[in-house]
Amino acid sequence: MKNHTVKHKKIFPFSVFRFPSSGFTLMELLVVMAILGILVTVGLTSYKSVQAKSRDSKRKSDLKQIATALEFYFNDYGTYPSDTNFQIYGCGTAGTSVCEWGSPFQTLKTGGTNVKTMYMPKLPSDPATGRVYYYDKTGTSPPSYQLYARLENTQDNDIPHSGTTAQSYTGTNCSSGSTSLTCNYGVSSANKTPEDGRTPLQ
């Protein structure tokens, strides 16, 4: 009898069981880097937007607080403080000094005894470098004033708009630098509006 050798065929080639390479191809790395770049860009944009809105909220709060202090001043003097270089001119002795942004808003009455009146421990200043608030005493009979800031979020509903285009107020400047930056948000005394005499412009 002849011996028959049974030959077993490999049903699954060894290559099927090879483990995949643990490295990345250049194309895969480029795709991952592109995705990370997009995520970082979106994250930074969102973060900056949140910061801007936070500063705008402070601006609105600051102007409201200053307006309250101006009413206390009015109750004492029967008028609102004057302005100089569009700052409040009503501090110091008898209210004859400029009230610097970031400094106390207080007067010192003279007479038999010196009486100090504190309207604000610290007159708020704009939270962004290079920007200031803008105060204008606009009338004496009856007394009135307008007070402005520049909001960063131009989609804010409190900014004047022409259709979908944000506008700002003529004759105002909320920049402390040499380049003018018109203000786009304002408050005023009860007998005035921020728009009075200041036609909104683009």
Image (tube, rainbow, N blue to C red):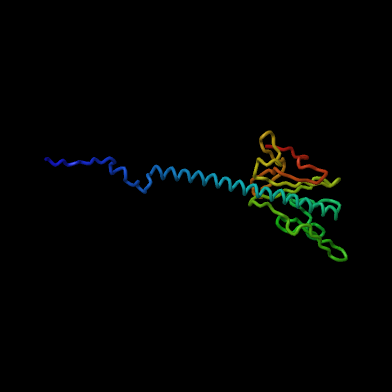
Q: Residue furthest bottom?
A: 113
The residue sitting at 31% across, 42% down in the picture is: 16
Q: Residue furthest front?
A: 1
Nearer-the-camera pick, 133 or 82: 133
Nearer-the-camera pick, 154 or 103: 154
State whether residue 126 is above or below residue 167: below
Query: Where residue 93 appears, x then y in whole percent?
Result: 80, 60
> To which quarter of the image does residue 9 belong?
top left
Number of marks in picture = 0
Q: Residue furthest right?
A: 112
**160 horizontally vs 110: left or right:** left
Q: Quadrant of the C terminus?
A: top right
The residue sitting at 70% across, 57% down in the picture is: 102
Query: Where residue 131 appears, x then y in whole percent?
Result: 66, 49
Q: Residue furthest left?
A: 1
> To which quarter of the image does residue 3 belong?
top left
Nearer-the-camera pick, 12 or 36: 12
Q: Quadrant of the N terminus?
A: top left
Query: Where residue 19 appears, x then y in whole percent?
Result: 34, 47
The residue sitting at 75% across, 49% down in the picture is: 135
Query: Where residue 149 appears, x then y in whole percent?
Result: 70, 47
The residue sitting at 71% across, 39% down in the picture is: 160
**188 horizontally vs 7: left or right:** right
Nearer-the-camera pick, 48 or 140: 48
